[in-house]
Amino acid sequence: MANLGMTPLERKLSLAVEAVLEEGLQPEHRALAMRRLSRAFAEWQDDLGHIFARALWRGEDVAGLRPRWPMEACEEFLSQEESRIEEAMVERGWDVIGDLLASRSGEGEDAPEDLLR
């Protein structure tokens, strides 16, 4: 996974996975690493409730546009272009959020009351 857009929790989870997979780790250290990974994973799952409108792409998506490509090529394309796709999604996401906020007639910047009812 590219580091672009990685939250601190995702980075913590990634580091915990790396620690568990470290070669030559003594059993007691591996057990400690597994406990840390378990805690990091639980924390990451809790945080998912605060993430909205996440898009994920799979090789099948590319295959829909390039049906003659083997799945391996579709996945490699996504792997190579992941950063560009992520950057474009974030940029377009900000545009959509701005447009949606602007379309709410009669609501000023400091008037979220209707959303909280």
Image: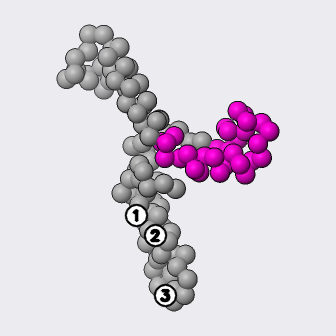
The residue tagged with tag 3: helix, strand or loop?
Answer: helix
Residue at image coords 46%, 69%: 16
Q: Which residue is mark 1?
A: 12
Q: Are marks 3 and 1 in contact (CB under 8 Å)?
A: no
Residue 98 image point, x, y percent: 34, 23
**Quadrant of the image for the C terminus?**
top left
Q: Are marks 2 and 1 in contact (CB under 8 Å)?
A: yes
Q: Main secondary structure of the magenta part?
A: helix
- Distance between mark 2 and mark 1 Cα atoms: 6 Å
The residue tagged with tag 1: helix, strand or loop?
Answer: helix
Q: Which residue is mark 3?
A: 28
Q: Nearer the viewer, residue 21 or 50?
A: 21
* Disc 2 packing (10 Å; few <14; some 14–19; many ≥20): many
Residue at image coords 65%, 51%: 76
Is 90 contained in the magenta span?
no
Amino acid at pointer 3: Glu
Numbered range of the magenta stretch? 58-86
First of labels 3, 1 by sequence position: 1
Q: Which residue is mark 2?
A: 16
Residue 113 image point, x, y percent: 26, 22
The residue tagged with tag 2: helix, strand or loop?
Answer: helix
Amino acid at pointer 1: Lys
Say how the picture is coloured.
one colour
Amino acid at pointer 2: Ala
- In the picture shown, does residue 66 fall above or below 15? above
